[in-house]
Amino acid sequence: MKNSKTRPKHYNSGDIQIWDFFGVLNGTQANILKCLTRVGLKDGESIADDRGKIIAYAENHLKNKLGLKHKVLSYDEISDIHAAIIQYIPRFNNSAYAQDLSYAVLCQDYKLFIDMVKHTDRFVCFAKRGKSDD
């Protein structure tokens, strides 16, 4: 697929994009999962930069300064989205850590998610998955 402003190389990490789920996910979930699918793939950004961005999204959600309620997905919605992510986005295949990351986000367990992302070695291994597919 042609590299463009609306579909640069780092967007092409699977058969689907997270924006295919935007109607179902809340903003935090969408942004975190979008970053997870592209971590380590964007030119000029390090894995540490991406990791910081991902943690910032989750921490901002936990602060929730406006007191807004976020949509809670049903068990069936979580299961369907999680299955699609695993099936269509290669870096989530055959990686229990990656699958746990996406599941924590879908369940809105951001404290667990942040703890998982802060385990640098596991996160770096995850981030390097799919880089050779360029």
Image (cartoon, rainbow, N blue to C red):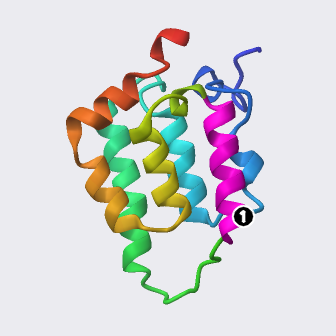
Q: Which residue is mark 1?
A: 76
The residue sitting at 49% across, 90% down in the picture is 67
Rendered view: 92 above or below 78: above
102 relative to 125 in the view: left or right: right
**Mark 1: secondary structure:** helix
**Residue 130 x, y percent position in the rendering:** 49, 19
Rendered view: 1 above or below 103: above
The residue sitting at 68% across, 52% down in the picture is 81
**Residue 36 x, y percent position in the rendering:** 48, 41
Residue 134 in sight from this viewpoint? no
36 relative to 54 in the view: left or right: right
Other residues around mark 1 within 10 Å, as few (<14) / some (14–19) / many (≥20): few
What's the magenta region? 74-89
67 relative to 58 in the view: left or right: right
Residue 22 in sight from this viewpoint? yes
Which quadrant does the N terminus fall into?
top right
Q: How many marks?
A: 1
**Residue 124 x, y percent position in the rendering:** 29, 30
Of 41 and 84, nearer the camera is 84
Which quarter of the figure has residue 8?
top right
